[in-house]
Image (tube, grey):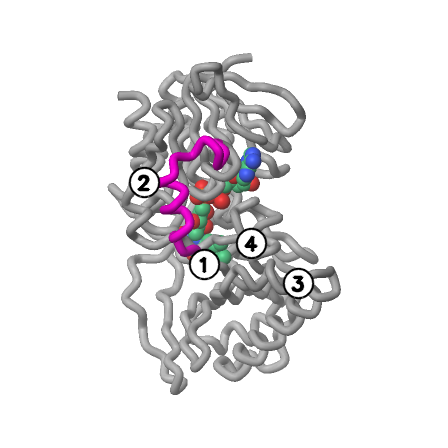
Amino acid sequence: MGYDVIVVGGGIGGLTVAALLSARGMNTCVLERQSQVGGCIARVEFSGYDFEPGMGLYTSFGPGEIYEKLFSALPVEPPEVSFTTPRVIRLPDGTDVPSHDEQLYSIAGGPATLAERLAESIKRSGGSVRLNSPVLRLAFDESGRAIGVDLLSGERVLAPTIVSNLTIWDTYGKLVGLNRTPPEIKKRLGTLQGRGAYLIYANIEASAVARLPSERMLVKDSAGEFTVAIASGQTAPDGKRAVTFQTETDVESWFTYQSSEEDYEEWDQAALETFWTRLHAALPELGSEVEVIETANPRTFYDLTRRKLGMVLGTGPVEQSRGNATFLPNVFMVGDTVSSHARVDSVIESAIRLADQLTS
Ligand SMILES: Cc1cc2nc3c(=O)[nH]c(=O)nc-3n(C[C@H](O)[C@H](O)[C@H](O)COP(=O)(O)OP(=O)(O)OC[C@H]3O[C@@H](n4cnc5c(N)ncnc54)[C@H](O)[C@@H]3O)c2cc1C
């Protein structure tokens, strides 16, 4: 069956563009390899806890801001949001100072609710969201024009316009194919720096949360910085809360120095111990009332999203200013490696721009 537009990937970028195009009457199909939508903001649930998937910093839900613009064009309601406590920065000497972030919101049910509302919108407008549908590559005709995509299952899906929600590396490396990618783009991709994240998902006694100066913190210490995000309005057993601690990590060592599964386990355990020690040194009020449940690292992000080397925190402003076009006239990109920041609201903003371009 043919569509007007195929969107490869059901992350926030792919879903936003597909929701807008469907609402404007285009027959749109999202192909997502996972069994749930959301990519980096998909649900993170372990042991009866629903965790904040990242730093828990959500902005732009105010009147006239980007979410109002998006949802006013869709046949679904936006997720419910509420103000969250202002973020506090803890300095290396232990002093707490207020941050000057924009107004922060917490999304009822977590950010995955946003992705789920967009998927619902696509379906209500007559579009399709196909889960468990990994795309292998673009399909080309004899003249070299992209005519659709080939799925891993062997199925070919046709459309005159294709949007990739994969990173810029994966759009060229996997969908287009490096053999078709012009040398100047290959060279640029080689010089682009991406970053990785290491996270601990833990449970924490509500009494220990009450001792923290805020439920959103940026903590600076001699090793760098990390964030604290206590999930609000999400599932947790009585008297406990779900907390996500996040720091940056380089990506290559997670793939290069581990030749076996035991090596990997050791590496992951060492990363956990180092980060755990940092957490307790910088946040002594946690005491013993916090317990590790799971961790995430570039390898787990690779498994979850298939992003090259599990790189998740953007590519830096130079690349991100280049926009949604590829060298193929009917293939476009959307997502955090081609938007102004690696943030949900920036990805949505660039997806709105792409939808406007495709329907103008
Ligand atoms: C740890 C962490 C903390 C963060 N914290 C915040 C925060 O507090 N606030 C904020 O605003 N932003 C935050 N971000 C950033 C934000 O979550 C991301 O920038 C955004 O969700 C990325 O969306 P995307 O559409 O670019 O891509 P992705 O979320 O990567 O989505 C791409 C989708 O494509 C799918 N896919 C991949 N390959 C294929 C294939 N071959 N076939 C079909 N489907 C495929 C993947 O499964 C995935 O669903 C955080 C990110 C991370 C990782």
Label 1 within 8 A of ligand 1 by Cβ: no
Q: Secondary structure at mark 4?
A: loop
> In this view of the protein, which residue sits in the foreground, 5 or 91?
5
- Disc 1 to disc 4, how far (Cα)? 28 Å
The part of the image, by quadrant, that contains residue 71 is top left
Say left or right for 236 vs 322: right
What's the magenta region? 176-195
Label 4: few (<14), some or many (≥20) within 10 Å? some
- Mark 3 or 4, nearer chain start: 4
Mark number, residue 349: 2
Q: Nearer the viewer, mark 2 or mark 4?
A: 2
Q: Amino acid at mark 1?
A: Arg
Q: Residue at x 37, y 80 (%)?
A: 91
Percent position (x, y) of residue 356? 29, 27
Q: Amino acid at mark 4?
A: Gln
- Mark 2 or 4, nearer chain start: 4
Q: Is residue 80 above or below residue 29?
A: below
Question: In the rendered structure, are the residues bearing label 2 and label 4 in contact, judged by CB atoms less than 8 Å apart?
Answer: no
Q: Residue at x 29, y 47 (%)?
A: 62
> In this view of the protein, which residue sits in the foreground, 132 or 319?
319
Q: Nearer the viewer, mark 1 or mark 4?
A: 1
Name the residue beneath numbered marker 4: 234
Percent position (x, y) of residue 154? 65, 23
Q: Is 121 contained in the magenta span?
A: no
Name the residue beneath numbered marker 3: 258
Q: Residue at x 54, y 29 (%)?
A: 137
Q: Is residue 106 above or below residue 23?
A: below
Q: Amino acid at mark 2?
A: Glu
**Quadrant (top left/top right/bottom left/bottom right) for the N terminus:** top right
Name the residue beneath numbered marker 1: 195
Q: Residue at x 43, y 55 (%)?
A: 194
Tell me if residue 138 can be seen.
Answer: yes
